[in-house]
Image (cartoon, grey):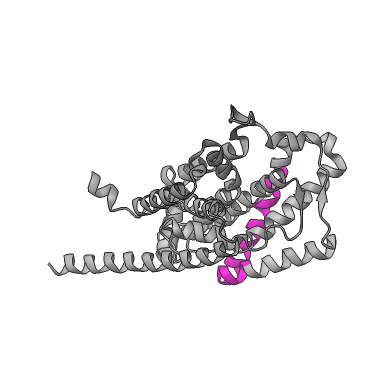
């Protein structure tokens, strides 16, 4: 049992997290304060929500680089409604509108990929530019802020409250709870449903999955629609956290999300990945970012570290696949 656990890639990521945490905590003990941990969880809830959607896309053998554009369009639309009809809305309606709009925009990617046989990376780069371009033309880059008080009050909700030495209250944010709910949803879909097994089959070998009778169009509609759903939910989370919406606020976020998912063990070639690994990948990215801040390291080094992490993760994944392949060859030879 122990050997099985320690041989998993997730265990390796977990040990890296432990080592990094010890080093950062030794340099700055504030890292281990509960207040800091809750702050990390809230700050990286957006990345975590996006990462669950990206995990399912990568497992299916695809990739989506347009989710930040979808989130931006969705968030901007919701923000306009908040400013014009804020008194007639509530947080549940806001999330519902964002979820529906995000899902529909995500399904557009699936249709383009399926009907025009365009590689996912090309299709989603195209829709990303179309979405960002249209938004910029229509809005002229205008920032939106000044949302209703009930919208700002929601993000301040805590599941429970604690008080630090300076009598400042903190606790587990409702935003973090939403991320936890998304994690459970992703785990349930991938591990407990026929749909989840179908997504793994699609990513493992699309041709074989089609011959086996899987409906490829429906699977892709779900996969990219789910990524759009996460983008829609994430757009509201982003607006809640910063209380502003800008046409370029999420530009470049794709790198962080893909890095976290790949770091968690998902393969860029499809068919491989777990929710646990993705959560650990997000946690490691969050710890590195927070640790560099606490150690007063310039922020631009975070991008450098992120790039190296992607390279190291892809290399580790390739090494694991090669080792597994060699092991199978040896077993067959025997």
Residue 288: horizontal and vertical position, in percent?
50, 55
Residue at horizontal 83%, vertical 34%? 88
Q: Which residue lies furthest to the right in this view?
A: 84
Q: Report the residue at 44% width, 66% height from top.
A: 269
Q: Quadrant of residue 139?
A: bottom right
Q: Where is residue 130 in the image (x, y as percent from the top left)?
A: 73, 67
Residue 4 as seen in the image, left or right of residue 21: left
Q: Is residue 215 in view from this perspective?
A: no
User: Closest to the observer: 40 or 135?
Assistant: 40
Query: Is 107 one of the magenta-colored residues?
Result: yes
Range shown magenta: 97-124
Quadrant in the picture for the C terminus: bottom left
The residue lying at 46 percent from left, 44 percent from top is 187
Quadrant of the frame with the N terminus: top left
Is 242 in front, or is 150?
A: 242
Residue 307 vertical placement versus 280 (above, below) = below
The image shows a total of numbered marks equal to: 0
Against 12, residue 173 (above or below) is above
Q: Where is residue 29 in the image (x, y as percent from the top left)?
A: 48, 43
Q: Residue at (68%, 49%) from the top-left corner?
A: 235
């Amino acid at each position: 049992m122990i050997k099985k656990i320690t041989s998993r890639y997730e265990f390796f990521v977990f040990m890296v997290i432990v080592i990094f945490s010890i080093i950062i905590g030794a340099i700055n003990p504030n890292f281990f304060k509960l207040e800091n941990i809750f702050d990390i969880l809230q700050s990286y809830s957006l990345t975590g929500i996006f990462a669950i959607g990206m995990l399912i896309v990568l497992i299916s053998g695809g990739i989506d680089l347009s989710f930040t554009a979808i989130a931006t369009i969705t968030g901007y639309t919701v923000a306009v409604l908040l400013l014009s009809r804020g008194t007639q809305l509530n947080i549940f309606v806001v999330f519902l509108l964002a979820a529906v709009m995000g899902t529909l925009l995500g399904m557009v990617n699936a249709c383009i990929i399926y009907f025009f046989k365009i590689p996912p990376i090309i299709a989603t780069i195209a829709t990303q530019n179309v979405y960002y371009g249209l938004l910029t033309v229509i809005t002229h880059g205008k920032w939106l802020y000044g949302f209703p008080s009930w919208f700002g009050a929601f993000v301040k909700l805590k599941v429970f409250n604690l008080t630090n030495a300076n009598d400042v209250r903190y606790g587990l944010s409702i935003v973090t709870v939403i991320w936890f709910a998304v994690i459970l949803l992703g785990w349930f879909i991938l591990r407990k449903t026929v749909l989840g097994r179908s997504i793994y089959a699609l990513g493992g070998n699309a041709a074989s999955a089609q011959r086996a009778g899987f409906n490829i169009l429906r699977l892709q509609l779900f996969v990219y629609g789910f990524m759009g759903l996460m983008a829609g939910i994430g757009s509201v989370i982003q607006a809640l956290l910063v209380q502003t919406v800008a046409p370029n606020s999420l530009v470049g976020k794709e790198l962080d999300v893909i890095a976290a998912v790949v770091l968690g063990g998902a393969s860029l070639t499809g068919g491989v990945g777990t929710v646990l690994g993705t959560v650990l990948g997000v946690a490691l990215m969050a710890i590195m970012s927070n640790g560099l801040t606490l150690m007063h390291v310039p922020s631009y080094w975070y991008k450098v570290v992120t790039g190296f992490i992607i390279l190291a993760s892809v290399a580790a994944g390739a090494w694991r696949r090669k080792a597994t392949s060699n092991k199978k060859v040896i077993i067959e030879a025997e």
